Amino acid sequence: MPSYAIVGASRGIGLEFVKQLSADKKNTVFGIIRNPAGSPNLTSIKAPNVHVVKADITDRKSLDAAAAEISKITGGGLDVLINNAALLPEGRTQQPLGAYGPDEQETLAQDLRDAFDLNVVGVVHSIQAFLPLIKKGTLKKIVSLTTGTADLDFTVKLNFPLTPAYSISKAALNMVIAKYAVEHKAEGIAFLAISPGLVNTSEKPPSPEELEVFKTLITTFQKDYPSWNGPITPTESVTAMRKVIDNFTVEQSGAFLSHWGNKQWL
């Protein structure tokens, strides 16, 4: 019976992973979230093979406690860990580095620190906490969600200066995955950094300002991806990523791939 732990499962992509994976009753699925009381979409799932576990990716002790709780249910192992939790600095996700004025340099520094703390250090803590369980699992896969905007070639080719803190931290995460991959390949553990594509995870209609940003993004991205028509749904993204994850092998460990299984980011 395969077991899956999804860190950051309260909404959007993480929640969709829980829904799709738990549809197969042979799977045991753990949705790891910071605040169960504030996550009704996850806690309302009453399937017997879904377990809600409380943990904060920035709190190593809570992750260790979550790993211990999961170990009791699975008998000590875990097959697949999916790190989905991430941070985009609120209200400043679309501005480039140069948009931070002279009096906003500490804000810039804090945005970078906050993104790095969750998107890099938090993922390292998660991997460290669950790695002993993965070693005892059967599938032995650790998957961390990243972004195509962390690809240097993509950024330069499309002249894309936006989401700097997010993109920089995710580029660092890609190296984290590569480092773990070379360290643990001999143990048969496959590490994957995967971009979900550009996914619409909003739970409310976009504001006029956000619509303008989306129009700019579409115009920018269609220069290199002329057939791209805008963000995809969490269902479309997770369906595509699951195919990549299912087919991913230890020989590919350390790869940075898109939801298509290649370097096509959109």
Image (cartoon, rainbow, N blue to C red):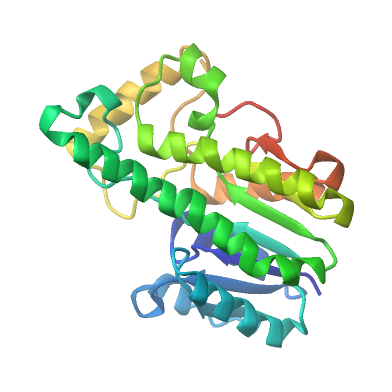
Q: Position of residue 96 (x, y in %)?
A: 29, 26
Q: Position of residue 19 (x, y in %)?
A: 58, 66
Screen quadrant of the C terminus: top right
Q: Residue at x 43, y 54 (%)?
A: 118
Horizontal arrangement in the rendering, residue 5 relative to residue 247 (left or right):
left
Q: Position of residue 20 (x, y in %)?
A: 63, 62
In the displayed structure, 177 sits above or below 61; it is above
Determine if residue 197 is in view. Answer: no
Quarter of the figure with residue 146:
top right
Quarter of the figure with residue 49:
bottom right
Q: Position of residue 5 (x, y in %)?
A: 63, 68
In the displayed structure, 258 sits above or below 35; it is above
Horizontal arrangement in the rendering, residue 142 relative to residue 212 (left or right):
right
Q: Residue at x 36, y 80 (%)?
A: 37
Determine if residue 64 is in view. Answer: yes
Front residue (pair 214, 193): 193
In the displayed structure, 161 sits above or below 25; it is above
Front residue (pair 180, 82): 180
